Amino acid sequence: MTYRRLSLIALLTALGGAVHLLETLIPFPLPVPGGRWGFSNSVILIALPGARLSDLLVLAIAKSTLGAFFGGRLVTPMYLMSVCGLTVAVTAMWAISRKNGHFGLVGISLAGAITNNTVQLAIAAAFIIRNVALFLIYPYFLILGSIAAVANAAIAYSVLKRAGGKLWETS
Amino acid sequence: MSIRLVTLSGLLILSAALIATLFIRNHPAEYYDRTEFLMGTYLTVVVSSENVSPVKLAAAAFQEIRRVEYKYAKDYGTEVMKLNSAEVGELVPVDDETAHIIETALAVARITDGGFDFTLGRVMDLWGFNKADTEKGVPDDDQLKEALRSTGYEYVRLVDEGGWFVKKLRDLTIDLSAIAKGYAVDSAISVIRALDGDATGYVDAGGDIGIIGPKYGKLPWTIGVRHPRSERADEVFDVVYLYDGAIATSGDYENYFIEDGMHYHHIIDPSTGYPAVSGAISATIVSSSVMLADAFATAAVVLGKSPGITFFPRNGALVMMILEDLSIFKSEGFEVYQTR
Amino acid sequence: MKFFRFSDLFIILLVVLALVLTLPTTRAGGSVVHVIQDGLLVRTLDLWVDARVEIGEIMVIQVEKGAVRALVTDCPDQVCVRMGWISSPGIPIICVPNRIMIVIPREKDSEIDVITG
């Protein structure tokens, strides 16, 4: 592992953790415990071009853990939901973004948001709240998640433009 | 690559499932609930226990509430009839329970400088607020003044450490039904706790709630404070979390009538005999017992955001008041109950 | 990486499709409302079938879009009518003189356990 990779992951983790923590200050309009917008996932998008899956997963889990730790939610089901949702979402985003392929940042971000929301709600319905009625709020989650996803794509785009397309030195 | 990807995601899912089992503890406790019409309102007991059948606990609670009702109900309560038929100056023997209730009522009346008064019976009769099936209307002012002369908690005394009750005014009518409702809930909770100290749940008497024990033994009960101006009864204005203790709310929206375009509600100001106009339209009290919470809540609507309200906390009653402009006034420290 | 590519439209389409499929149309699960008179369950109504139901010539209750209210009652009290709509188990609509209670039975954990007021 080169120092550049290590420091990049560390930097993005710190940034993501901070946003993860700060975004809890933005009111989330759905009555869900631990409901968040997900703006911190923009760091995943920033890191995406040319990244290895393992690096992305380390970044995603570290970011969630850091944010949850400072937010005082480390040993809660919410943390579990966010880590599980994010790992699956990151894998999905990585998979469709490979080979500098067919999708733009908006599409990738949206795909990540849907996967994340679906997995999180599925976990909540299966293990935590144990009520299928929870899926009634799924569409509202989807709408809010999509708004955040497009915002994330815009953030990632402007950062990447300034960074020359990608942050990693080798793909 | 694809084989690595499959193994990787397999491992991920496996570890996720593993973490899941670590994080999620089952809630074995199921809550049993039963509702009955008692003491002029609906009463719900929500209870769970691992040692005693919750059905049995709820039955014991209702039996206790019924016992209290027959003793202190407004018109037919055996104890209340005895007290109201007493002559001026006559020493009426009362048992410890009645003495305790009257003592508490007198204490709250003194603390709130008469904002809470349990001798308003005749005034309430005139307004028609006493019973659900009587016509309500604005009474004649002279009649009201006349009735008001025979009210006042200061004309009630307990002597000899509460063993005897004396009234000092001939037409004084005491009405213990309001405070007895809270007492009944507290007493029912004691009965449940005596049968099983680890039982959890709550007792809800028309929005006056006493906690038996935390939800599933560890979570607070989430209690919504009703929006005083909503056309929906279940619209929540604010949320309070309680692990134990009691909460009660009084508001001008609970029972009222409109005559000649004027809104007359059931919380009568004991000093004027008319519905209280204090600026407060709803008052929620968190206290150690439902009896105290309920009595202080009524007094808070009468007093409004006056200096008197600042004395509530030092008597164990934290207040959250919703004012006419839907702004909130809270006692210092009330926020403690608004975070999990 | 580009901000937007043509293929992204497919993913947007996917989101819209998921939305259309999951947005609640008429009903939200099997939510019902119980009408209890004198402690006995006299009616069970579907919360998602709009209706006006007469209860023994003393009360008319109205069900609309997942909420229920007492529309007309013969008692002088009118407290139940003034309570307005409910759509959650936190608080029942009560008519004390007629001993009628309109309650949405508790399903599993809802956000608010009970309402004070």
Image (tube, rainbow, N blue to C red):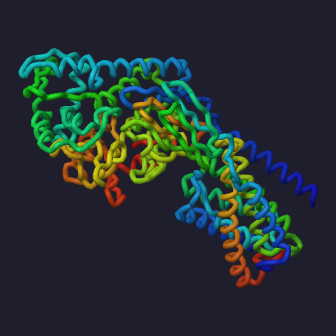
Q: Residue furthest front?
A: C57
In the figure, residue C5 lies in which quadrant? bottom right
Q: Nearer the viewer, residue A97 or B54?
A: B54
- Residue at 9 percent across and 19 percent down: it is B87
Whole-percent x and y of residue B141? 14, 44
- Residue at 73 percent across and 63 percent down: it is A113
In the figure, residue B186 lies in which quadrant? top left
Q: Is residue B294 left or right of residue B103?
A: right
Whole-percent x and y of residue C70? 49, 42
Q: Nearer the viewer, residue B132 or B270?
A: B132
Relative to residue C16, is residue C31 depicted above or below?
A: above
In the figure, residue A114 lies in which quadrant? bottom right
Q: Is residue B86 left or right of residue B210?
A: left
Count of numbered circles in the view: 0
Relative to residue B252, is residue B181 depicted above or below?
A: above
Q: Nearer the viewer, residue B195 or C62?
A: C62
Relative to residue A170, is residue B182 depicted above or below?
A: above
Whole-percent x and y of residue B269? 20, 44
Q: Is residue C32 left or right of residue B62?
A: right
